């Protein structure tokens, strides 16, 4: 009787859903420099749309190499500041929480079949936009009214 092989099965390349690809593109847009530094690649010569596509492909490769899903990639490799700002400005969701919570919130939105980022979303970065500050002030006023 022969013995089973001890070789490890090679990990299969997982096809990334279209919503996740769209989400990754919307996350990369405006954060090209930070993500390029994180991935240790140079996209300075590329034009903007080509740089976004290059970085998205590198993130997909990272998903496959590390055997992660979108939530795992976001929680493991992205900071809370970037994820929080993305949640608020692009998804219109709460930006509260640490990396795993924000990653779950984002991946839940990306998994929806009709996911598309806001067409007028601005470049996402660590610095919150003035629109965000106005939203926070409105939320504070609502909380004050409820506590009275």
Image (cartoon, helix red, strand yellow):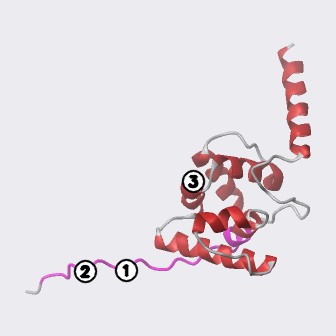
User: Counting other residues with Cα less than 10 Å from the Cα at mark 1, is it few (<14), some (14-19), or many (20 or more)?
Assistant: few
**Which residue in the rendered view is the most extreme toward the bottom?**
2
Q: Are marks 3 and 2 in contact (CB under 8 Å)?
A: no
Query: In this picture, which residue range is highlighted in magenta?
Result: 3-22
Residue depicted at 47% across the width and 73% down the height = 65
Q: Residue at horizontal 20%, vertical 82%? A: 5
Q: Is residue 25 magenta?
A: no
Find numbered disc 3 in the image and state the secondary structure of the residue it sits on. helix
Direction from residue 120 to residue 106 in the image, left or right: left
At a point 85% along the width and 35% down the height, the residue shown is 136
Looking at the image, is mark 1 or mark 3 nearer the viewer?
A: 3
Query: Label 2, on which residue?
Result: 7
3 or 2: tag closer to the N-terminus: 2
Q: Mark 1 — residue?
A: 10
Task: Give the SS element for disc 1.
Answer: loop
Residue 13, horizontal then vertical, whole percent: 50, 80
Does the magenta portion include 9? yes
Separation of disc 1 and disc 2 at Cα?
9 Å
For the residue pair 86 and 71, the one nearer the viewer reads as 86
Instruction: Rate crowding at label 2 as few (under 14), some (14 to 19) or many (20 or more) other CA atoms within 10 Å.
Output: few
Q: Are marks 1 and 2 in contact (CB under 8 Å)?
A: no
- Looking at this view, name the residue that lies furthest to the left: 1
Specify which label sits upstream in the sequence, 1 or 3: 1
Q: CA distance from mark 1 to mark 3?
A: 25 Å
Compare residues 106 and 55 and report the one nearer the observer. 55
Q: In the structure shown, which secondary structural element does the residue marked by tag 2 occupy?
A: loop
Q: Residues within 10 Å of mark 3 (few under 14, many from 20)?
A: some
Q: Residue 72, position in %: x, y?
A: 54, 58
**Residue under label 3:** 75
Q: Residue at x 87, y 59 (%)?
A: 121
Quadrant in the picture for residue 111: bottom right
Relative to residue 123, is residue 74 drawn left or right?
left
């Amino acid at each position: 009787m022969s013995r089973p092989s001890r070789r490890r099965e090679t990990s299969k390349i997982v096809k990334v859903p279209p919503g996740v690809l769209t989400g990754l593109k919307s996350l990369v847009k405006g954060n090209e420099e930070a993500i390029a530094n994180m991935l240790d690649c140079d996209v300075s010569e590329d034009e903007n749309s080509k740089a976004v596509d290059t970085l998205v492909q590198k993130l997909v490769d990272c998903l496959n190499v590390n055997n992660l899903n979108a939530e795992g990639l976001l929680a493991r490799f992205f900071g809370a500041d970037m994820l929080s700002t993305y949640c608020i400005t692009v998804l219109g969701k709460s930006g509260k929480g640490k990396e795993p919570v924000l990653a779950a919130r984002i991946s839940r939105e990306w998994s929806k079949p009709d996911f598309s980022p806001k067409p007028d979303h601005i470049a996402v970065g660590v610095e919150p936009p003035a629109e965000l500050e106005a939203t926070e002030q409105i939320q504070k006023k609502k909380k004050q009214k409820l506590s009275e």
